[in-house]
Image: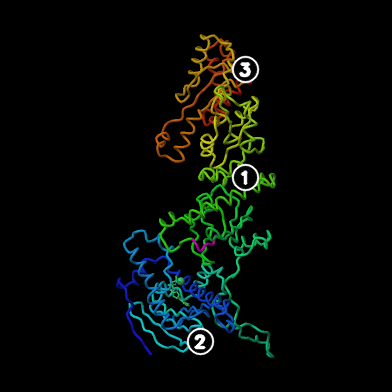
Amino acid sequence: MSEKGTISIHTENIFPIIKKFLYSDHEIFLRELVSNAVDATQKLKRLSSLGEISEEIGDTTVEVSFDKEKKTITVSDKGIGMTADEIKKYINQIAFSGATEFVEKFKDKGDAKDIIGKFGLGFYSAFMVAKEVEIISKSYQDGTEAARWVCDGSTEYEITEATKESRGTDIILHVADDSEEFLDEWKLKSILDKYCRFLPVPIKFGTKDEQIEDGKDDEGKPKYKTETKDRIINDTDPLWTKSPSELKDEDYLKFYKELYPMSEDPLFWIHLNVDYPFNLTGILYFPKVKNDFEVQKNKIQLYSRQVFITDEVKDVVPEFLMLLHGVIDSPDIPLNVSRSYLQSDGNVKKINNHITKKVADKLDELFKSDRNSYQDKWSDIGVFVKYGMLSEDKFYDKAKNFALFTNTEGEFFTMDEYKAKVEVNQKDKDNNVIYVYTTDPGKQDTYIQVAKNKGYDVLLLDGVLDSHYVNFLEQKLENTQLKRVDADTIEKLIDKDEKIESVLSADEEEKVKGIFEKAVANPRMNISVNSLSPDDMPVTITMSEFMRRMKDMAKNGGGQYAMMGNMPDQFELSVNGNHSIVGKILRAKKEDKKVQLAKQAYDLAMLSQNMLTGKDLTNFIKRSIELAAE
Ligand code: ADP
Ligand code: MG
């Protein structure tokens, strides 16, 4: 029997189109063929377990091999196999309709890259690398003949009887001239490692026999023996498929090292195991988050029934969880469709929500069960928790119970605890509680000490996300404002409307202002004379919280604030009329002396803002020496 036929198809020359579309992803042909072989094997096992097959099914290892001379790549399985009729049905009709649909759908779309890898083209992806494909198959069903199907990538195929004794299917690719790079051991091995590493059926690569040294002969020359090396390339029961109750910490750490050989140990992990309303298994690890977290993204691998699909999990995993590492396996994630579909898919949304909830629950549990160890890890997980709070309201609702504040004393507080701590002492005249914070304890030390002397607590908000976090907290927390410790003079930072009497007359204040204007001579300084406590600094330079945040936003994001970025910085310079230096300035006989003292006080304020540099710094040092020598 020999039969020739034409594959009924609307699109002429489907293969050049397939080839072109999937150009950058040719390697997936191997994933498709091996996973078909695995499917056929598992179908056989299922039939056997249902008692449909009487004899032992024996070894079911899938073999991948290649022959450089013959220019072939072969994928062989011992699965259910196909009869000639089944080949016609499954390969000519079903597989082809999938390929046709693909081309119909995407031939006019410009964003082919987006589709690549999301669309399992199935069997026909073989033609991305082959000029001719042969199927030799024998069904598991008693009394059926083996069949051979050949197709050269045109719409014509030939089907004949074949001689094949054993059950299963061989797919033989006759590799096209422009794809000979795939006839390479290293290349094929690396593709198998990527996609087939955790397939549930053993995969053997390279059936070649090897000459192994085996002692020496009488003349002392090495003897060789022929051995077929055991080259199973996959782990058929990866950790995520096991029950969490069987596993120890070592197992999780070992698996992590397998996935990311060069990485530091993770902080902790979550084993996902859901079967309703969707199927999902997986293990998510919390790495130590580095400040440069772009490089840490795309570390989660997505599988569908243990077949690697992609490590671009952007739409399946919430954005803020992209910092996690690990694997997710779900047959319910539709992988064969475009990204925009994925985003609107109900299952994907549910998976998203579920993962978010699990992560929040895990953090809550860690916090409650061992607060000290949680606090120790806070410097690593803090960025992650804040990122989550900023980006997902649902996460915020849970995280507000385990998100921590740290202050300059190194103490930790939950949001509620912190409120209770500062509520009384840091309330202003309008009943707002003011959280005072520093973004750089080294540079803002002078201001921090002034605030502490006043009995205020100073939060440490020096992380990469904290400028966003500050804005966010103000929106979330009622009657609460956050002010950087150098945003105002200490009396105004938390304005309690406690008036301090001025020792200066209005006339003297004017005079002092005039002297400072002359000494400072800087249009960026908005000078005022105020009555502060005599213990406060003689001169304080501040930039208002509002102004600084606008500047930060312009720097970080641009947009509507971009124009602010071009504006020169504007500072408030507050002269403390009650300070003894001011009295000394007024009493000084010579004008030169007045200006010299004012300059000195001004430079000291500049110094504590880290703004005194260059010539001004040199002059300050000279003047300090002169004053000390007087
Ligand atoms: P899919 O795997 O999504 O069904 P494919 O194009 O990969 O689509 O394969 C089409 C069909 O061809 C399969 O559903 C299966 O019935 C049949 N098939 C492919 N490869 C094999 C194989 N190695 N053994 C048995 N049947 C196979
Ligand atoms: Mg398939």
Q: Where is residue 272 in the image (x, y as percent from the top left)?
A: 59, 58
Image disc number at residue 410: none
Residue 297 is left or right of residue 150, and the answer is: right
Kindly identify the residue that appears in the image at 41 percent across and 37 percent down: 562
Kindly identify the residue that appears in the image at 42 percent across and 83 percent down: 84
> Which residue is disc 3 drawn over?
534
Q: Does the magenta stretch include residue 323?
A: no
Q: Does the magenta stretch include residue 331?
A: yes
Nearer-N-terminus badge (3/2)? 2
Image label count: 3
Q: What element carries label 2?
A: loop
Image disc number at residue 142: 2
> Do tag 3 and tag 2 residues touch (Cβ < 8 Å)?
no
Q: Where is residue 215 in the image (x, y as percent from the top left)?
A: 68, 84
Q: Which amino acid does label 3 sit on?
A: Pro
**Cα separation between marks 2 and 1:** 65 Å
Q: Where is residue 622 in the image (x, y as percent from the top left)?
A: 57, 25
Q: In which quarter of the image is the N terminus?
A: bottom left
Against 456, is 185 above or below? below
